[in-house]
């Protein structure tokens, strides 16, 4: 049947590709969609691992039915994570398969009760406990805060498949090429980093803990709940997540600025010019009013240097820059060099706010801090050039 793809014998991808949602979590753009990967494991007992968003319930349950023996039902729904992009179909599924047991941990059970009003036939598993399906054996590992408190992963022991839910996942619909060896990985790696930096990044410490917890498992396939299934090179996606969650960066600089009338923009140009003179190859410039923060975060997560510039707006940062800084604070972005610049005309605000953020203790400030009054003077622009030069030297070290 269309949209059912074998991962192993009697183990199927039954996920849905979402090309309709414009904004994931109502904030992150999805120019090429997203997949909600769901899996059906057909042992003597039948388990579905992670479900999909509620609006796909009809097509989704058609796929499940196509894999059931005549008169058969789903025995277990394994809920690795309660975010509604995966658990949305849960209530309808219980209606269709009334005897289906729902498997999660203690925290999952609490959320199932409070989101969906379901408390019966919910099985609570502990860290390291197993569920024998007959022919397949599922083992559960709690990985709290990757990305909600109840998050866990499910490992199928006989085939060595790790159903890792949000961990190791990324944006981008799969459109029938679900495996790493048949995907455009250049495209997907960027979408995976976008997913990581937008959604998971704040929980980098917990990702590290999860990687450490799973390090002794023999893994043949990593099957996350979004993005490609890694059967050729599962170590690659673990290595990427490991690097990102350690805040390891590449040589390069992201220059993010805002400007209403071009004065702060001229300061950005002077910095960018000096970065070019320093032969800094990887420089990404974003006008924060026009680049969606989702894409700005990818570059900030990737590169060792960031330079933020803003005019003063009603005594504060320009609002889109304020929003970026708020997100970076919330994500506790660290281990990067930061430069700041900006302008005011009658009452300062923007540069102070950026400077305060730069001194949060997680970042290393690169001097000089440049602040222009009204239009930047030749001396201001010279300071901007110096900032670019110093930044280039720091990120090269
Ligand atoms: C809506 C608005 C609010 C502003 N608020 C302040 C302010 O609180 N303090 C200040 O010194 N300048 C303020 N300014 C003046 C800006 O500093 C000035 O417009 C400057 O040119 C902005 O830099 P830009 O040319 O890069 O946009 C404000 C300007 C606008 C349009
Ligand atoms: Fe999630
Ligand atoms: Fe998710």
Image (cartoon, helix red, strand yellow):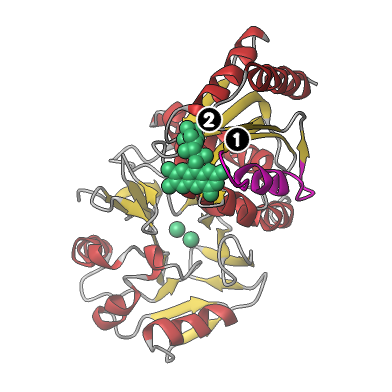
Is ligand 1 within 8 Å of the beta carbon of the residue shown at mark 2?
yes
- Tell which of 340 and 220 is nearer to you: 340
Q: Is residue 262 left or right of residue 297?
A: left
Residue 332: % across, % down: 67, 52
Residue 245: % across, % down: 67, 46
Outermost front residue:
346
Pointer 1 and pointer 2: residues touching (CB < 8 Å)?
Answer: yes
**For mark 1, what is the residue?**
342
Label 2 Cα crowd, 10 Å radius (few <14 / some 14-19 / many 20+): many
Return the disc, 1 or 2, that comes first in the chain's sequence. 2
- Count of numbered circles in the view: 2
Q: Which residue is drawn at the image coordinates 38% and 76% (left, top)?
A: 75
Q: Quadrant of the C terminus?
A: top right
Examine the structure image and report whether residue 173 is included in the region drawn in magenta.
no
Quarter of the figure with residue 164: bottom right
Which secondary structure, mark 1?
strand
Is residue 197 positioned above or below 52 on the image?
Answer: above
Is residue 318 visible in this depiction of the protein?
A: no
Examine the structure image and report whether residue 355 is included in the region drawn in magenta.
yes
Disc marking residue 122? none
Q: CA–CA distance between discs 1 and 2?
A: 6 Å
- Tell which of 26 and 241 is nearer to you: 26
Residue 105: % across, % down: 57, 78
**For mark 2, what is the residue?**
264
Span colored in magenta: 345-363
Q: Which residue is drawn at the image coordinates 59% and 66% (left, top)?
A: 139
Is residue 207 positioned above or below 178 on the image?
Answer: below
Q: Is residue 241 left or right of residue 113?
A: right
- Tell which of 279 and 206 is nearer to you: 279
- Tell which of 397 and 270 is nearer to you: 270
Residue 191: % across, % down: 45, 38
């Amino acid at each position: 049947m269309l949209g059912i793809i074998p991962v192993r014998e009697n183990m199927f991808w039954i996920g849905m590709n979402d090309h309709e949602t414009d904004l994931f979590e109502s904030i992150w753009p999805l120019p090429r969609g997203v997949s909600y990967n769901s899996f059906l494991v057909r042992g003597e007992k039948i388990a579905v691992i992670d479900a999909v968003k509620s609006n796909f319930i009809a097509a989704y349950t058609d796929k499940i039915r196509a894999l059931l023996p005549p008169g058969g039902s789903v025995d277990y729904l394994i809920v690795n994570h309660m975010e509604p992009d995966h658990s949305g179909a849960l209530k309808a599924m219980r209606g269709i398969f009334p005897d289906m047991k729902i498997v999660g941990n203690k925290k999952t059970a609490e959320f199932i009760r409070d989101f969906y009003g379901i408390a019966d036939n919910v099985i609570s598993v502990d860290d390291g406990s197993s569920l024998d399906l007959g022919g397949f054996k599922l083992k559960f590992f709690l990985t709290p805060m990757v990305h909600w408190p109840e998050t866990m992963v499910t490992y199928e022991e006989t085939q060595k498949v790790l159903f890792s839910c949000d961990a190791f996942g990324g944006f981008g619909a799969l459109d029938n090429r679900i495996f790493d060896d048949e995907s455009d990985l250049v495209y997907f790696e960027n979408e995976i980093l976008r997913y990581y930096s937008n959604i998971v990044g704040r929980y980098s410490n917990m990702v590290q803990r999860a990687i450490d917890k799973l390090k002794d498992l023999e893994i043949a396939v990593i099957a996350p709940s979004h993005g490609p299934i890694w059967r050729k090179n599962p170590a690659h996606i673990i290595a990427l997540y490991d690097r990102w969650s350690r805040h390891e960066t590449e040589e390069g600089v992201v220059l993010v600025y805002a400007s209403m009338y071009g004065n702060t923009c001229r300061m950005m140009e002077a910095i960018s010019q000096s970065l070019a003179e320093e032969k800094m190859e990887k420089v990404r410039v974003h006008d924060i009013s026009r680049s969606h923060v989702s894409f700005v975060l990818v570059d900030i997560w990737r590169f060792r240097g960031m330079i933020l510039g803003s005019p003063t707006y009603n005594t504060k940062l320009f609002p889109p820059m304020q929003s970026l800084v708020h997100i970076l604070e919330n994500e506790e972005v660290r281990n990067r060099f930061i430069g700041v610049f900006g302008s005011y005309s009658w009452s300062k605000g923007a540069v102070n706010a950026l400077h305060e953020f730069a001194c949060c203790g997680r970042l290393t400030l690169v001097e000089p801090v440049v602040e222009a009054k009204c239009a930047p003077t030749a001396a201001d622009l010279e300071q901007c050039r110096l900032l670019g030069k110093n930044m280039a030297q720091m990120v090269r070290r």
